[in-house]
Amino acid sequence: MCRVTDLQQAVLARNEEHAHALRAALAGRGTVAVNLLSSPGSGKTALLEAELSLARERGVPVAALTADLATENDATRLARSGVPVKQVLTDGLCHLEASMLRGHLVGWLPAGTRLLFVENVGNLVCPASYDLGESLRVALASVTEGEDKPLKYPTAFGLANLVVVTKADLAEAVGFDEAAFRAAVARVNPGVEILLTSARTGLGTGGLLERALAVLDGAAVHRPVMAGRAQHTHGRAESQGDVHGHEHAHGDGPGDLHGHSHVLVEEGL
Ligand SMILES: Nc1nc2c(ncn2[C@@H]2O[C@H](COP(=O)(O)OP(=O)(O)OP(=O)(O)O)[C@@H](O)[C@H]2O)c(=O)[nH]1
Ligand SMILES: [Mg+2]
């Protein structure tokens, strides 16, 4: 079993500082960030496509940034909505970090953006430990993944302000046990709201936009019990198998902004 390194602890602590600064900078611009995290293929982009189109129809100034290890596929899909979209390629990194995100926002995030949706790298482990300065963290799970995923990935689901079930149109076909899923979520994150959605049928789409707009209007978000504990404890709990992912967490090429946060603060995102 791998031991969490001091380096990893330092990376997480530093990320928290960047995240606090980014949250403040976004608030100063009147922007609320929504961080979407889930396993690969669970339907983040499909749901976002629906939310972005709806936001555009309603005249809500939104933007979306999507992160992947490779391809611009998601940005291409999201851009069809007509809202500003940016693809970030992480050069092998399994998650976004606050400083990286900020670096990609500087000079790009359009003035007047009220909601910024951030689609994290598809992964239920690494992204969970990294606060991105979001005001709403959403953990998604598709019905095809099994009802026990919240128990197996307690940090991802335990730190969420909102949980979204995707691909509800497939629930019957795969025998999805909604009650069991709800019970699993309740174990790791008591009281968190669970939204049922299907990008295929349209069920529940718009729900995420509604929740994000409510946060923008000042509504209180669900505060996970786990959030009151030390973030590093959570990182440690689920990072044992992916220490390497954090140790090379500084390799984001031109977008890598570790050590440059003060410059960015001066640039005043
Ligand atoms: N039946 C059904 N299929 C869906 C739904 N949402 C997404 N899919 C399909 O699931 C697959 C993956 O969807 P994506 O939206 O790309 O998932 P993702 O989470 O963005 O994937 P990564 O970005 O690679 O992590 C695609 O084939 C989608 O068409 C849904 O609501 N119902
Ligand atoms: Mg995607």
Image (cartoon, helix red, strand yellow):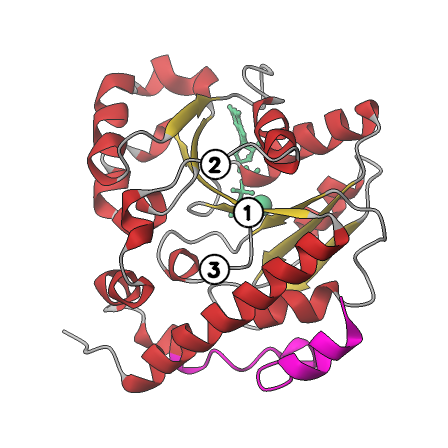
Count of picture labels: 3
Query: Residue 36: within the magenta?
Result: no
Classify mark 3: residues with Cα within 10 Å, few (<14), some (14-19) or many (20+): many
Mark 3 vs 2: CB contact within 8 A: no
- Is residue 240 placed above or below 56 in the rendered structure? below
Q: Which residue is mark 1?
A: 135
Distance between the alpha carbons at the discs numbered 3 and 2: 15 Å
For this view, does 168 lie left or right of residue 79? left
Which badge, 3 or 2, is on the more N-terminal residue? 3
Q: Quadrant of the N terminus?
A: bottom left
Identify the residue shown where x is 58% and y is 20%. Answer: 200
- Is residue 101 placed above or below 110 in the rendered structure? below
**Magenta segment, which residues?**
247-269
Distance between the alpha carbons at the discs numbered 2 and 1: 8 Å
Q: Which residue is mark 2?
A: 221
Query: In the rendering, which numbered label is found on residue 131?
Result: 3
Mark 2 vs 1: CB contact within 8 A: yes
Whether residue 90 is visible, yes or no, is no
- Is residue 224 placed above or below 242 in the rendered structure? above
Identify the residue shown where x is 52% and y is 36%. Answer: 43
Q: Quadrant of the C terminus?
A: bottom right
Whether residue 205 is visible, yes or no, is yes
Q: Which of the two discs, 1 and 3, sits closer to the camera? A: 1
Q: Amino acid at mark 3?
A: Asp
Ligand 1's image quarter is top right
Classify mark 2: residues with Cα within 10 Å, few (<14), some (14-19) or many (20+): some
Query: Residue 258: within the magenta?
Result: yes
Identify the residue shown where x is 44% and y is 45%. Answer: 38
Q: In the displayed image of the protein, which residue is found farthest to the left?
A: 1
Q: Amino acid at mark 2?
A: Val
Identify the residue shown where x is 30% and y is 65%. Answer: 235
Classify mark 1: residues with Cα within 10 Å, few (<14), some (14-19) or many (20+): many
